[in-house]
Image (cartoon, rainbow, N blue to C red):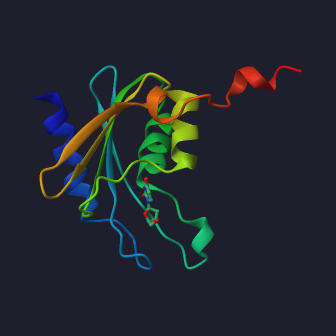
Amino acid sequence: MKDDELIRKASEVQTTAVASYSHFNVGAALRTKSGKIYTGINIESSSYSLTICAERVALFKALSEGEREFDSIAIVTDSVELCPPCGACRQVLWDFAPDIKVILANRHGKTKEYLLRNLFPAAFDQNYLQV
Ligand code: THU
């Protein structure tokens, strides 16, 4: 199944997360509408607030390669409770992929999927920049 492959890719990179301070490893795998997969890990800085989440790393990698159409993103952590994307990642995903499917998974085989639009209701976006 397509989603299993995405979860597998996110699991593979999750082990390489640079989570030196939180030790909370996150892996993400973002699939474009054309079927290409871009992965991301969380990368932490000694100046903690400069940390970037796995989801945004995957999205920014894809955007910087010219991708603009996204289908789904898988997010994998070690936590017993499935880890949903943080508010900052929801915003940036919304800006570029409001219709994206968000698949959460952990290393214990638990999964759940959402549509971003249900995770991020009444969102701010470029439409509100008109004055
Ligand atoms: N983190 C992510 O990579 N994605 C999320 O959706 C939640 C949080 C990272 C940021 C930080 O490196 C660590 O998890 C703990 O917050």
124 with respect to 4 (left or right): right
Q: Quadrant of the N terminus?
A: top left
In the picture, the quarter occupied by the C terminus is: top right
Number of marks in the rendered image: 0
Residue 38: percent from left, percent from top = 34, 40
Camera-nearest residue between 70 and 91? 91
Q: What residue is rendered at 22% in x and 39% in y?
A: 6
Q: Position of residue 28 (x, y in %)?
A: 33, 48
| Of the pair 49 and 59, the residue shown nearer to us | 49
Q: Is residue 74 left or right of residue 54?
A: left
Q: Quadrant of residue 45?
A: bottom right
Residue at position x 41%, y 78% from top? 20
Residue 67 visible in the picture = no
Q: Residue 21 appears at what percent x and percent y?
A: 45, 79
Q: Which residue is painted at 27% across and 25% down in the image?
A: 35
| In the image, farthest residue toward the right | 131
Q: Is residue 124 above or below residue 83?
A: above
Rendering coords of residue 53 (x, y %) = 47, 56
Tell me which image quadrant ligand 1 sits in.
bottom left
Q: Is residue 117 left or right of residue 105?
A: right
At a point 34% along the width and 32% down the height, the residue shown is 114
Is residue 95 visible to the viewer in this orientation of the structure?
yes
